Every structure is written in C-alpha cells, then in structure tokens.
Image (tube, helix red, strand yellow):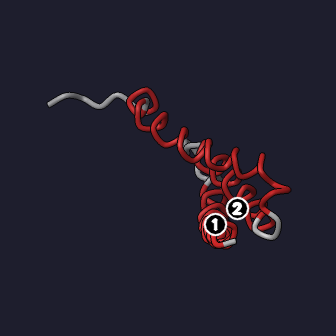
C-alpha cells in the first residue's frame, strides 16, 4: 500500500512539473512570430504539457495507466541524453578565434 501511495505522489509531482510548462509554451509560441526562431522548443513543450495532464489523470488509478507511466519514464530518461549528444548540428557555425 505504501508503494502505491508513493507512486501516486510521484505521479502528481511529475505531472504538475510537466504541466507547469504551459507558461513557457505560451511565451515560446508568442515568440514564434519572430523570424528565424527555433521551432522545436514549442513542440517539445507541448508534448510534455500533454504528458503532464495524462500523468495527473494516471495518479488516480496507476494500474490502469501503466503504459502512460512507462512512456513518461522512457521518454524522460531517453530524450535529454539524445539532445545533449547533438547540439552542434543545430547550432549555426561560429567563427573560430
């Protein structure tokens, strides 16, 4: 019983953390009106905001939402390392000094 309660608390905290990306998402979309801006940030933020809402729903009955929880865990563990391995391909070439 303690394990399920701990899982529910973690799901609520992570869901709130992901759903808190609504404000940065709105500001990122608003700044999209500026030319030459990056399009991937609003896309990733919208994915995490949506995932946060589903994690909040999963906190009620975690056993019914096992696939959502597994997807959230896998995507959160897998995505950041892959972003860090390829930043140079997305950066404009800067003159070397």
Looking at the image, which residue is at 70% across and 61% down?
52
Quadrant (top left, top right, bottom left, bottom right) of the C terminus: top left
Q: Position of residue 69 (x, y in %)?
A: 71, 52
Earlier in the chain: of badge 2 and badge 1, it is 1
> Considering only vertical position in the picture, is 42 above or below 85?
below
Between residue 50 and residue 63, name the one nearer to us: 63
Disc 1 element: helix
> Considering only vertical position in the picture, is 51 above or below 11?
above
Q: Report whether residue 89 is seen.
A: yes
Q: Position of residue 93 (x, y in %)?
A: 34, 28
Categorize mark 2 by other alpha carbons within 10 Å: few (<14), some (14-19), many (20+): many
Residue linked to disc 2: 52
**As drawn, which residue projects farthest toward the left?**
97
Going by the image, does 15 lie left or right of 34? right
Going by the image, does 94 lie left or right of 40? left
Looking at the image, which residue is at 43% across and 26% down?
89
Going by the image, does 68 lie left or right of 25? right
Q: Which mark is residue 3?
A: 1
Q: Which mark is residue 93?
A: none
- Real-space Cα distance between discs 2 and 1? 21 Å
User: Do callouts 2 and 1 mark residues in contact (Cβ within 8 Å)?
Assistant: no
Q: Report whether residue 23 is seen.
A: no
Between residue 89 and residue 71, name the one nearer to us: 71
Q: Position of residue 49 (x, y in %)?
A: 70, 60
Between residue 86 and residue 56, name the one nearer to us: 56
């Amino acid at each position: 019983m303690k394990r399920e309660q701990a899982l529910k608390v973690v799901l609520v905290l992570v869901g709130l953390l992901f759903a808190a990306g609504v404000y940065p998402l709105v500001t990122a979309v608003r700044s999209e009106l500026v030319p030459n801006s990056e399009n991937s940030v609003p896309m990733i933020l919208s994915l995490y905001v949506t995932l946060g809402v589903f994690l909040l729903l999963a906190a009620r009955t975690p056993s019914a939402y096992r696939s959502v929880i597994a997807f959230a865990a896998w995507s959160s563990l897998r995505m950041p390392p892959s972003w860090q391995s390829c930043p140079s391909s997305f950066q404009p070439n800067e003159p070397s000094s």
